[in-house]
Structure formats: C-alpha cells, structure tokens
Amino acid sequence: MAVVNLPSGPLTLSGRTAWETPAGPPSSRIAYAAAHVVADPRAENAPGAPAVLDWEATLAFRRHLWSHGLGVAEAMDTAQRGMGLDYAATRELVRRSAAEAAACGGRIVAGVATDQLPPGPASLDQIRFAYERQLADVSEAGAVPVLMCSRHLAATAHDADDYLAIYRPLLDVADKPVVLHWLGTAFDPALEGYWGSSDVDKATESVLELINSNPAKVDGIKISLLDADHEIRLRRRLPPGVRLYTGDDFNYPELIRGDEQGYSDALLGIFAAIAPAAAAAFAALDRGDLESYDRIFAPTVPLSRHIFKKPTFYYKTGIVFLAWLAGHQPHFTMVGGLQSGRSVPHFAELIELADAAGLLPDPDLAAHRANRFFEVTVG
C-alpha cells in the first residue's frame, strides 16, 4: 500500500487512475492547457534572478499534454509570466515549444505581453511597440498569439479609448486571428480597471467594441474573471465565429458543457494538472455521453478550487507540486523561488483531492515524494 504520512495522519492512496489516452484532439470543443515551466534546480532561480529552465522536462510536459489531445497555451500566467519568468526565457520557451508542436502536429497558442519593459511607468507608444515586438516573436515562432493583459497598460491607460488605441493597431498588424485575454484581479491585482473601468459591465462594452471593429482578426477571447454568469452573457454577445475560451478554473465543466444557446471552449491552467481526466471527459462529450462527462469532471472541481483558492495568483505552486507528485518532473523547485507560495496544510489537502480525482498515476512514487516533503517541512 502507498501511504502518505500527512500532518493530520496517514492517508492510503487509492491508485485510482483509469483514464484512457484518446486517439486525438476532441472534436466537439477546442481545449488548451496553460502549461507551467520546469526550473533547473541547479541554477539560481531565486526571487529576482533570471529564470533558468530544465528544457527537456519542460518540453516533455508539453508532449504529455499533446499526447492527451489537448493544445498547449504557452508562456502565459501558468508559466509564471510576471512571477519569475523573464522575457529572455519566455522568447526561447515559445520558440522551442512551437517547434515541438510543429513536429507532433499539436495545437499551440502563446502569450504576447509587454514584460520586456522595465517595471514602472511607460508611455502608450512604448507599450504598443513592446506588444508589437512580442507579437512578431510569437508569429515568427509559428504559434497563435494571445494578446495578454499588460500591467504597463493598466498603469498608464486613462480610459477605454487608451486600450482601444493599443489593441486596434495590434489586430491590424497581426498576420493571423489572435486570442484576446481578460485576466481578473484575483489572478493579478495590478490589472484593476482593465479595459478602462473597474465596472465589469462597462469594461465588457469596451471589449465588445474592439471585437466588433475587426472580428475577422479575433479567433476568440479568454475570460478569467471567475464569474460564470458574466462569461455566459458575454459569450452570447460575441459575433459569429468568435470563440469564448473559458479561463474559469472554478466553473469549467458547466461552461464547457454549455446550454441551448452555446458553449465555451477552454484555455485553462487546471487542465495542465488534470490532463488525463480532462481528455477522458472530452471524449465522453464527443460521443454525447453527458453522464460520464459530468462524472469524470466532478472530482476535479474541488481540486481545482483548492489549487486556485485565494491568494489565487499562487496557484502555480500547486500545479507544480502536483506535477512533481505525478512524476512529470524530478523535483519541486520553481523559478523565482515560488515553491514557497503555499503552506504545508495546503499541500496536504491537495494530495487528498488529487488522489480522489484519480490524478496520481504512480501511487508509490507519489507517496515516496510526499513523505520526503513532509519529513523536511514538518519533521
């Protein structure tokens, strides 16, 4: 038996993992997993230090996601953009991942932001140039661009017109339809008032004005506001052909399932942690088996809500901890020293929830690693 000596007492892992690998990507939805990066444990990777990655482990994890039929959302929030991953490492990450995607025929989108600018104030012209430079980098690599929210723009813009003055030219120069991105303050408090207002309804009108001005250049919009009702309202107002990619790590099963008026596709950080279960759920959805779809996703939701609990921006720590327990990397070290972002009780509950969801494929390995962790941290 695989037993984890949790601080609260022993836990025998169930070893319940019966997910079949699908033959290919889902046919009923488009699904991207926002992937984390694997740090090189021998490098500095301390707070404020340049990120040094273990490239083989980082790319192997992306191959794992593609093998389950999921697309990869590269160099986004889950990869620690703005929380340890500098732009030099980001650019190389996009280049290498896009080459891997081309080699295996996997879907890939990649984040475009302004994080090569130094922290602090920036002019609108500087912000636009930074966006354009990253847009060119992602396009040249062969990935679909995701125009991520910019902390610089949030700090500089006075109103919705300033946002439109940045985004409209970006859509004009993009050589392919892009994915827009709306990340809420739970994920990044520096994005307060994005799209020109702290009133979500007013901000939504600005987003729709942008999309309706050039819908041919918008593949879709990723929404990460953790507000299912708002997402559905926005989804119903999008022009034909523009997708809503849910980024709601609390309510994804019902948003993806949809209703008589439509559904959301997906671009989710939690999918990196639950890829085998997500792939099985999509396979059930493809064959119209909604009972199995709901049953498979149901135990992943408590896990996701735990990983993404407040302070939500530390969710990356739980994603990496679970990747280590599941055998996708040999250590629990993160760029920027972010492995310190969650508590021992948080990790203990994460193990229980991951086991209940059938996401620890090798119980003996998971128990061995978890016990080593608790021996060091608890004694």
Image: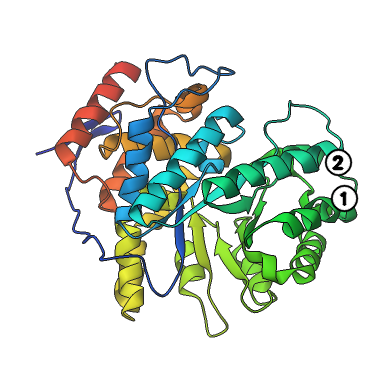
Q: Secondary structure at mark 2?
A: helix
- Report how many numbered discs are placed on residues in the image: 2
Q: Position of residue 352 (x, y in %)?
A: 30, 43
Q: Position of residue 303 (x, y in %)?
A: 39, 49
Q: Position of residue 70 (x, y in %)?
A: 38, 58
Residue type pointed to by label 1: Asp
Question: In front of the other: label 2 or label 1?
Answer: 2
Please tell me which residue lies in front, 177 or 330: 177
Most distant residue in the left direction: 1
The residue shown at (23%, 60%) is 21
Q: Are marks 2 and 1 in contact (CB under 8 Å)?
A: yes
Horizontal placement of 235 versus 248: left or right? right
Please tell me which residue lies in front, 124 or 328: 124
The residue shown at (51%, 69%) is 255
Horizontal placement of 14 versus 265: left or right? left
Quadrant of residue 31 within the rendered picture: bottom left
Q: Residues within 10 Å of mark 2 (few under 14, many from 20)?
A: some
The residue shown at (55%, 48%) is 110
Q: Could you give the CA–CA distance between mark 2 and mark 1, rounded to whole angstroms?
A: 8 Å
The residue shown at (56%, 17%) is 49
Which tag, 2 or 1, sits closer to the chain's start? 2
Q: Position of residue 36 (x, y in %)?
A: 45, 39
Q: Residues within 10 Å of mark 1 (few under 14, many from 20)?
A: some
Describe the colour scheme in one phrase: rainbow
**Residue 135 numbered mark, or none:** none
Residue type pointed to by label 2: Leu
Identify the residue under disc 2: 124
Please tell me which residue lies in front, 308 or 9: 308
Please tell me which residue lies in front, 75 or 294: 75
Where does the N terminus fall, quadrant-wise? top left
Please say whether residue 311 is visible from this viewpoint: no
Identify the residue under disc 1: 162
